[in-house]
Amino acid sequence: MNRAEYMDQLKSALAGLNQNDISDICSDFEEHFDIGLSEGKSESDIALELGSPKEVAMTYLNRDDKDDNIIPEQSPFTSHATTNSESESAAKGSSDPVNQAISQTLNQTKAPPKDLNGPRAFVVLLNLLLMVWVWIGIYSTLIGFWGITAGLVVAAIALLSALAFLPAGVTAAIVLLALALISFSVASGILNFFLTKLTIIATKGYIKWNADVYNNGF
Amino acid sequence: MNTQYKKGVLDLCVLSILKNGDQYGYELANRLSEMIQISDGTVYPILRKLAVDGMVTTYLQESQSGPPRKYYRLTGLGQTALIDMRREWSSFAESVNKIVGGAFS
């Protein structure tokens, strides 16, 4: 198959799409042929490598159908049309999100590579100046809470073991107090367990956020 | 090779190649078809879909030989998506390898 035949078949297989989409797609394939020829390949070799035009067209049709279902028809007033040709296509009432998105991306000229220095410096400074201390504070508090729980348990055990040395009259009161201490320790233990879990989740999330900002910026 | 296999991961492959630098369609198609058995024509619908979804942007650049070429560049959105897709892929591949390797025999 030569270039003209290939393009003809592609065009007719794309017939379901609107004219703008078809010419966009065809220009991609014309470019492919141009470059291939400039590298010394024959038209038929390039056509062979590209694969059957009908199958290629099917892929476009499926994808574009899907997009049409997701993106509702745009009125000319909500479309992002900026140039005359785009406004015209929108005014014709053709719902054409595909073409609009492509035109928008085409309109963007080569942007400088994303500058990561700012976000990286931000992450490093934020951690050194502030977050290190915040996290030390959070974890110290957590350790303190666990200390309270342990203290309550120790106090209850001490009280119970001192029973033998205390006058018989206060036994009931001491046992009650010890029970109260144990209940408090259990309650605070449960609370601490969930606080610890929460802190670990927060720490992981925070580390992940740091990595994201560091690697990809904001 | 089973074409159903490839369909799902070609987006990931295209985004991964673009992460290493902007490419024009022809070059990208050639690189991909060197590694995976696909027809060059498969790449263009994928690129178009990625552009519509905002994963890549395009721009035209003159070349020494022939007409200007349409280059594709990964966007911030594309980078984020790539990180997610890569994570998904490696855990999926790991599981499949385990099963294929006889984890349940």
Image (cartoon, rainbow, N blue to C red):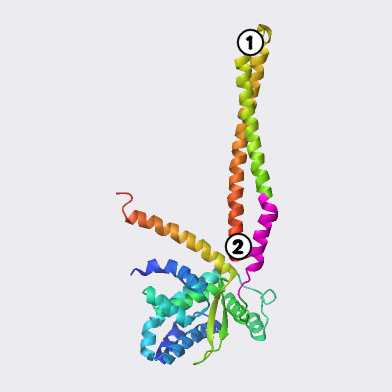
Residue A56 visible in the shown view: no
Circle 2: element type: helix
Could you say whether the residue bearing mark 1 is in a helix, strand or loop?
helix
Tag 1: amino acid = Phe
Instruction: Give the image location of residue A143, x and y in percent.
Output: 63, 38
Seen from the viewer's position, the closer of residues A102 and A19 is A102
Q: Quadrant of residue B101?
A: bottom left
Residue type, mark 2 in image:
Tyr
Q: Residue at x 35, y 54 (%)?
A: B99
* Vertical order, A84 against A165 (above or below): below
Neighbours of disc 2 within 10 Å: few (<14), some (14-19), many (20+): some
Q: Is residue A103 positioned above or below A207 on the image? A: below
Q: Residues within 10 Å of mark 1 (few under 14, many from 20)?
A: few
- Does residue A86 show up magenta in the picture? no
Q: CA distance from mark 2 to mark 1?
A: 64 Å
Name the side, left or right, on which A169 lies relative to B72: right
Magenta-colored span = A113-132
CB-based contact (under 8 Å), mark 2 and mark 1: no
In percent of width and height, residue A55 lies at 40, 77
Instruction: Tell which residue pokes out farthest to the top in this image.
Output: A168
Q: Is residue A130 visible?
A: yes
Q: Name the residue tied to disc 1.
A: A165
Query: In which quadrant is the C terminus of chain A drawn?
Result: bottom right
Residue A76 to residue A2: above or below: above
Residue annotated with mark 2 = A214
Question: Is residue A119 on the magenta stretch?
Answer: yes
> How far across and how far down the image is residue A213, in percent?
62, 62
Q: Nearer the viewer, residue B71 or A96?
A: B71
